[in-house]
Image (cartoon, rainbow, N blue to C red):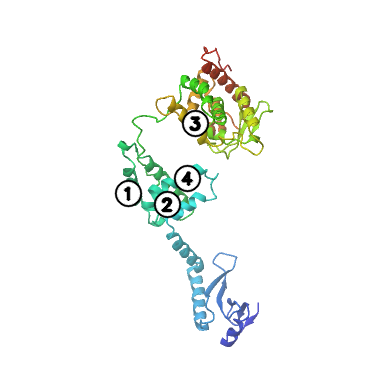
Amino acid sequence: MSAIKANALVIKSKLKERGVYTVDKHPGLHLASRGDGTGSWRVKYRPPGSKVQRWYTVTNDAKNASFDSVLEAKDKFLADLKHQKVDPKAVLEEKAKAEAVAGITYDAAFTEWLDHPGRKRALSKRTREEYEGVYARHVKPRVGATPLTKLTRQSLEKSLRAIYDATNDPKSGQRGLQATKAYQNIRSVLEWAVDREYIPANPLRRVAWLPAKFNPAGKQSRAMTDAELRQLWLGAPAVMSAAEWRVLRLAILIGRRVSEIAGAKRADAHLDADPPYLFIPASREGNKAKQDDAVPLPRLARDIIREALAAGEEGQPLFVGAATRWTASAALRDFRRDHGWPGQVRMHDSRTLINDHMARLGVPTELRSRTLHHTGDLRQLANTVYSSFDHMPERYRALRLWQARLINIVTGSRFRALRWYR
């Protein structure tokens, strides 16, 4: 690094030569030339308590700044550094950061929160759509354009109350559920903003919210009865496609969600294993636990998958023609309407029927939870009873017991004395 004299002509000439130059008799002062007649004056210094040197830019307009003004600014900077024991550049950086943060709106924070890489796992498509829908309908119109630093407990409670009033109309079946979701959304985004140091504290922390009211009519859907299950099992093949009926039968036999089954690939079927099983990856839609799982297949389930493999070709989904959860669910909806079933019966609620029958068979509670892949229970089971062991033999036994009970139901025969014995 060459030194130059503090001369206007010399400085002007060096601005046409790209490089960094020291200045005679002015230690720490540097001219950084861009080589096009412009450049900047900088000071090299060591912050208090630091062993690392830093650069402080006095001006980026070296072409027009007088040398005397540069010296004055340099001396003031070093004097502040010496007497205040604070790095002036750090102060400026903090101020710039604060100004940038002050301009971040809730809308920008929400968008960043949706995609932030710190999540343990990425949001599923359905969860993301749910968050975006609640935000677009209720949150964005009220707080989207507001800077995070301007959000207060009082302003947020006022906005949430407005959402609650707008979504709480018993006559139209609205119970304030959307307001609860909006509250949870805002609280989560603000907690994340605190972690990002966008705001010092979450204004909604420790603020309780009015819960959604229970539906006076109770749960809106129910599990099918044994009689309806028999009617479906015997009558559906005549009115549904083979693929739709395979998905529904398999869901009944193994107690898993329709979306977990409908999205299966041919390679997920492992019929030569002992016991044979259907692999459900963590990424599969409907796999709420987001954990890889192998579902043991009793005899009838195995036969269904063999039929599906024979009906399709390599490169196709396992259930060609019913590879989405909507297809089989719509087929069940049409069937129950045609047969006049009262109320709303969803395929998902058949898991309740299966769980009840397994309970009558004496299958232990924790094993029923593991077999049906209940999301909430899995976390507890992983830390207590099950650890990393998948209990494949026990689950296989439980599903074979349920298969035997299912055969009793659909054939109308008397229940055999089936029990789970330890």
User: Mark 3 and 4 residues: CB-CB less than 8 Å, in contact?
Assistant: no
Distance CA(mark 2)–CA(mark 3): 50 Å
Q: Counting other residues with Cα less than 10 Å from the Cα at mark 2, is it few (<14), some (14-19), or many (20 or more)?
A: some
Residue 201 circle label: 2
Q: Which residue is mark 4?
A: 129
Mark 3 — residue?
A: 331
- The residue lying at 48 percent from left, 26 percent from top is 352
Of circles 4 and 2, the one toward us is: 4
Q: Is residue 408 above or below residue 96?
A: above
* Mark found first going from the N terminus, 1 or 2: 1
Q: Position of residue 280 (x, y in %)?
A: 60, 34
- Amino acid, disc 3: Ala
Which mark is in front, 1 or 4?
A: 4
Q: Tell me whether circle 1 and circle 2 mark residues in contact (CB < 8 Å).
A: no
Q: CA distance from mark 1 to mark 4?
A: 26 Å
Label 3: few (<14), some (14–19) or many (≥20) C-alpha neighbours in 10 Å = some
Q: Is residue 199 visible?
A: no
The kind of residue on which mark 1 rests is Lys
Q: Nearer the viewer, mark 3 or mark 1?
A: 3
Residue 214 spot, x, y in % from top left: 36, 33
Q: Secondary structure at mark 4?
A: helix
Quarter occupied by residue 255 = top right
Mark 1 or 2, closer to the camera? 1
Quarter of the rendering occupied by the N terminus? bottom right
Q: Callout 4, which amino acid?
A: Glu
Query: Which one is in front, 258 or 383?
Result: 258
Q: Earlier in the sequence, mark 4 or mark 2?
A: 4
Which one is earlier in the sequence, the residue at label 3 or at label 4? 4
Q: Residue at x 65, y 35 (%)?
A: 313
Mark drawn on residue 158? 1
Of marks 2 and 3, the one in the foreground: 3
